[in-house]
Amino acid sequence: MSLAAEKLKYRLLGVIKGDTYRYSQNVQGDFSNLQPGEFDWWKYKYYIKQIERAEKGSQIEDYFKKQDLTFSLPEAFEITGKFTLTAGGDLLSGDQLTPETTEHFWDEVEDFYFDGVDSIYANLETPIASSKPVQNAPRSVNSTPELNGTLGMFERYLHDGRGINFFSTANNHCLNQGESGLIETLELIDKKGCKQVGTARSIEEQRDIPIIEKQGVRVAYLAYTFTLNGDQVPEGKPYLVNHVKLNNPGEKLDLVKEHVQIAREKNADIVVACLHWSLEFESYPIQNIIDMGHRVLEECGVDIIIGNHAHVVQPIEKYSFIDPIQGVRKTGLIAYSLGNLVGDFNTLNALLGILIKIELTKGIHKEKEVTVISDLKVFPYYIFKQYEKGKYKEIKLLDFIKLINNIEKGQLPYVFTKKQFKEIAHLKRLFLRLIFTEQVFLKRKNLKLFYSNKEYIRRLPLNKVR
């Protein structure tokens, strides 16, 4: 079946399904164990329309609207050290994602993402095995894609030594090139002087929880994936990948608990868990995922969750819990999905992503040494694709707030198509439905966000639109 015919098929299926396809559904989304109708549901989201409504009747949207994502230090807090980490989303391969088309990829985000921070994280969602053929996801998806990225794009991630320096490698594509491809990827990360977590060459490496220390603040990283897309872990080598079925509401979290305990024994002040979970192309996590996020904090003692896999932005939650190891009340953070960082999806909502910056502060409060989340900043970006003769001329991340304000002023940095303007109009409304922080509120008054796409196009300087 041609791609056009397949898209028509799923457009018609969306009409037939009606409300069923307008809201998130309570499924596990594991490609190794899809239930009847699940693959059709996935294809509808991929080809036709991403899901922007939470489970019907769940009150999930109202719950996230009430989130207060401001953080501050308690009174009489004596600071002894600070640690700042930044985090981005999924790093995927694509046939037009090359060093040549991404020469200026980081220009508008590098100050926020790379400069003046102690750890720069992203999810490496493809092996980088140079001994094997490059593989990208096809435009028409009838089976789970097998991925293998390029050394050239990996160098782009590193950005001449000032870019990403910490990767999670536990995800549904980590075994796409088998055990040898996984090991080759780990060797490359080692060779480039970066750190990773989530896959390992031995049980000892799996248990050697990585910790980064700055100004006396020790931050541990963990990573887990809910699925391997049917790829098989070689017999007797479960340590190769941290596989925990996070989308399963009844899943035991023994491996996570074990790793948190090791991290605390290594005097980690903060434990960050990078979770490959949730459902693809859905703007809100389903209730099972929200409950699992709470369990990871309450039962395991994780402080911060950075989610990936959904390929679109999902909300951020500030969550109060009692640490099961330390026995004290804490304020944790769950970023359910940051979206794609480097990817070649044509799905509309995958063009919006966020970077986050988390400040951690260590000090003395009420005669006890504690480390707390003291600040959160969110940086939205738009994945801009400039075409020439049907191929990418350039792809880069544009500062989304700056882009919107420039459009409102008629100060266009690029020539956009009408289709791209409609995309931006849609994404800016979606963004403010999902993410509510003081930083965004301060800028919100500058954004005319609530008129229709039709009115938005009418206001544009059409002589600058192709």
Image (cartoon, rainbow, N blue to C red):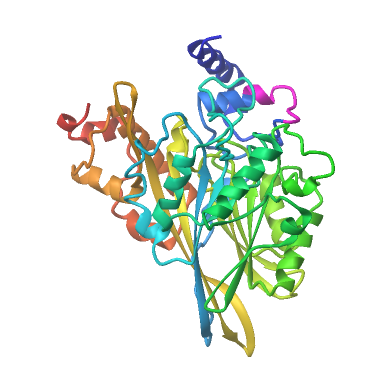
Q: In this view of the protein, which residue sits in the foreground, 225 or 187?
A: 187
> Which residue occupies the extreme left position in the image?
463
> On the picture, is 198 further left or further right than 167?
right
> Which residue occupies the extreme bottom position in the image?
367
> Which residue occupies the extreme right position in the image?
236
Q: In this view of the protein, which residue sits in the foreground, 84 or 189?
A: 189
Q: Is residue 387 visible?
A: yes
Residue at image location 74% in from the left, 22% down from the top: 36
Residue at image location 28% in from the left, 35% down from the top: 456
Q: Taking 355 as reference, is 286 above or below it?
A: above
Report the quarter where the C terminus lies. top left
Q: Main secondary structure of the magenta part?
A: loop
Q: In which quarter of the image is residue 362?
A: bottom right
Q: Give the range drawn in magenta.
A: 32-40
Q: Taking 346 as reference, is 274 above or below it?
A: below
Q: Is residue 174 visible?
A: no
Q: In this view of the protein, which residue sits in the foreground, 187 or 233?
A: 187
> On the picture, is 388 further left or further right than 200?
left
Residue at image location 30% in from the left, 34% down from the top: 421
Report the quarter where the N terminus lies. top right
Q: Taking 31 as reference, is 199 above or below it?
A: below
Report how many numbered discs are placed on residues in the image: 0
Q: Taking 87 as reference, is 231 above or below it?
A: above
Locate residue 68, reporting x and y percent. 51, 62
Locate residue 79, reporting x and y percent. 51, 84
Locate residue 316, reporting x and y percent. 54, 54
Locate residue 97, reporting x and y percent. 42, 34
- Magenta span has 36? yes
- Magenta span has 235? no
